[in-house]
Amino acid sequence: MELWPAIDLRGGRCVRLAQGDYTRETVFGEDPVANVREFVAAGARRLHVVDLDGAKDGVPTQAALIGRMVAAAGAPVQLGGGVRSRETAAGYLAAGVARVVIGSLAIERPEVLEALAREFPGRIVLGLDAREGLVATRGWLETSTLRAVDVARRHADLPLAAIVYTDIARDGMLSGPNLPALADMIAATHLPVVASGGVSCAADIRRIAETGAAGCIVGRALYDGKVTLAEALEAAGPGA
């Protein structure tokens, strides 16, 4: 299973939110480029980056910083947050981002997701952030009436790289992953599913791997020292 250490950006800093709440922010670094270098030096083979400002405001406000992070990484970077147009997605891919996560746009304008997936096969990720099973959009500030598993099924035939499935209630809480919901998502699609939200220890990563998930995003547990990157990589198994 692939392991994706997470770097969430807000105001040019590395932060984590609790349950997607912008008023419950913890700052973990003033220099995200340094965070990138530290993760890669410690053995990370890929990174998951989220532009929280972009997710909230709908525009790529931290593109220059992300470009520096990609240049420093020397490893695949998966990026989400604020990608609300074909131009933004294509710009990030041209700038060296390996995979772009499409969330709100997939719900509000699914035809754009479909066109992007066909234009950039294997480089577009469907981001499904769920609150009690329903997809949330616009930086988790709005909740739709659509079930995440239904959206996954709707787009199952597209040449997507993966689905990133986040349980918002668990995100940043170190409360353990929602394994039943993850299993339902994996059963709903043949696309690779990357789990996000709730990882608190190496055992959680092993449990996620046992579900058949293709990947696991780990954030706060690494920053709080609940698990080291070496322990997380070992728990994820070969190919992490």
Image (tube, rainbow, N blue to C red):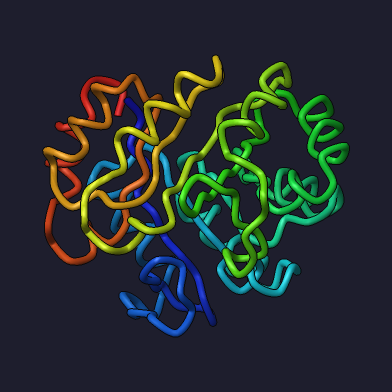
Q: Considering depth in this image, is 154 or 25 the residue closer to the camera?
A: 154
Residue 237 on image: x %, y %: 21, 24
The residue located at (46%, 75%) in the rendering is 21
The residue located at (34%, 19%) in the rendering is 212
Residue 19 on image: x %, y %: 40, 66
Residue 108 on image: x %, y %: 80, 51
Q: On the rendered structure, is 157 left or right of 11?
A: right
Rendering quarter of residue 180: top left
Q: On the rendered structure, is 92 left or right of 180?
A: right
Rendering quarter of residue 114: top right
Residue 143 on image: x %, y %: 62, 60
Q: On the rendered structure, is 31 left or right of 124?
A: left
How many numbered markers are drawn?
0
Q: On the rendered structure, is 149 left or right of 96?
A: left
Q: Is residue 55 above or below residue 57?
A: above
Q: Considering depth in this image, is 16 or 95 the residue closer to the camera?
A: 16
Quadrant position of the C terminus in the picture: top left
Q: Considering depth in this image, is 239 or 166 the residue closer to the camera?
A: 166
The residue located at (48%, 79%) in the rendering is 22
Quadrant position of the N terminus in the picture: top left
Q: Considering depth in this image, is 142 or 1 the residue closer to the camera?
A: 142
The residue located at (27%, 31%) in the rendering is 208
